[in-house]
Image: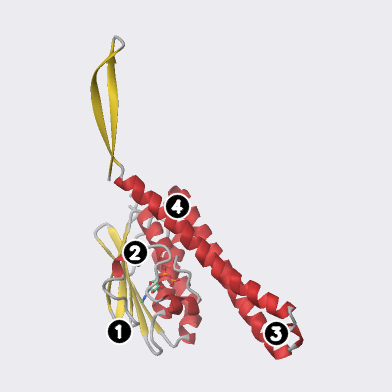
Amino acid sequence: MYKVQVVPVWSEERIFGAVMVIHDITEVRRLEQMRTEFVANVSHELRTPLTSIKGFVETLLDGAVEDKKLSHRFLTIIDEETDRLQRLIEDLLKLSHIESHRELIIQGETEVESELCRIKSLLTPVAQEKEVTLHFEIAKSLPKVPLTSDHLQQVLVNLIENGIKYNKKGGHLFLRAFSKGQEVHIEIEDTGIGIPEDSAPRIFERFYRVDKARSRDIGGTGLGLAIVKHIVEGSGGQITLSSQVGRGTTFFITFPAVKKLTVL
Ligand code: ADP
């Protein structure tokens, strides 16, 4: 998309020519559209649980509060919807913080092995609840990666939690961490439901979900992978995926290794 501007050229109070300036505004328009869509999405995502909370509170005030069983059911829904709003706001704040403080991501160096061990013990109960088995294969003496431990944790927890959430009962999740040249590679493979080919390119977009109802039921906000991509790329790394519907998904992350200082 282009914007054409004609600028007259004056000489001694007379126009003696004109200059045509052509601005390529494709990117500006694309960013404007993305911002508008994002605001519309946020409003929709916030309004849905709020409408539900308001509806149930009004029904309780109208008399349902007298019925113990009914009021317990309504209060449980209100509690779940409030949790959902809280998760959504936390994820929105994380995303906005990462976007406005990109420089903070790389203000750190983190040991991959100890971080992965910590995350494994953190997520083992979550996996056990879904009857998913975690298998971690971590190479010895991995170099450090150039991001804070908090950011590395956000990336790994999001991806592993997804590998558990979108897995099948009795499924597996394999994590492999190794180094190659000047890079650290982390692969997270699950035996879950997989991602359709046409959805794969959109999976890192904010609020994009393959199955909205399913993601909502299992407490997803649709922001996890957008946060992951921002952090990985902010640290100078890359993230890609390969998936097969019904068989599972693998995410491939590459971080630049932190160079060791040799003392002479
Ligand atoms: P959500 O909070 O919905 O999980 P994410 O941004 O983490 O949001 O992921 C976006 C969507 O990508 C999910 O709703 C789901 O449809 C799909 N997805 C992410 N990870 C996986 C996975 N490991 N297997 C299958 N689908 C996945």
Instruction: Measure how far apart labels 3 and 4 are at the Cα level.
Output: 42 Å
Amino acid type of the residue that numbered disc 4 sits on in the rendered structure: Glu
**Residue pointed to by mark 1:** 246
Q: Which marked residue is nearer to the observer: mark 4 or mark 2?
A: 4
Amino acid type of the residue that numbered disc 2 sits on in the rendered structure: Leu
Is disc 1's CB within 8 Å of ligand 1? no
Verify CB contact (< 8 Å) between mark 3 and mark 2.
no
Q: Which marked residue is nearer to the observer: mark 1 or mark 2?
A: 1
Can the viewer see residue 263? no
* 219 left or right of 140 in image: right
Q: Residues within 10 Å of mark 4 (few under 14, many from 20)?
A: some
Q: Which mark is residue 79?
A: none
Residue depicted at 54% across the width and 70% down the height: 48
Q: Which marked residue is nearer to the observer: mark 3 or mark 2?
A: 3
- Precedes in sequence: disc 3 or disc 1: 3
Residue 129 x %, y %: 49, 86
Instruction: Measure how far apart labels 1 and 2 are at the Cα level.
Output: 33 Å
* 150 left or right of 64 in image: left
**Residue pointed to by mark 4:** 99
Instruction: Measure how far apart labels 4 and 1 are at the Cα level.
Output: 34 Å
- Precedes in sequence: disc 3 or disc 4: 3
Q: Which marked residue is nearer to the observer: mark 3 or mark 4?
A: 3
Residue depicted at 57% across the width and 71% down the height: 49
- Is disc 2 placed on a helix, strand or loop? loop
Q: Residues within 10 Å of mark 3 (few under 14, many from 20)?
A: some
Front residue of 123/246: it is: 246
Amino acid type of the residue that numbered disc 3 sits on in the rendered structure: Ser
Position of 160 relative to 69 (above/below) = above
Instruction: Measure how far apart labels 4 and 2 are at the Cα level.
Output: 28 Å
Verify CB contact (< 8 Å) between mark 3 and mark 4.
no
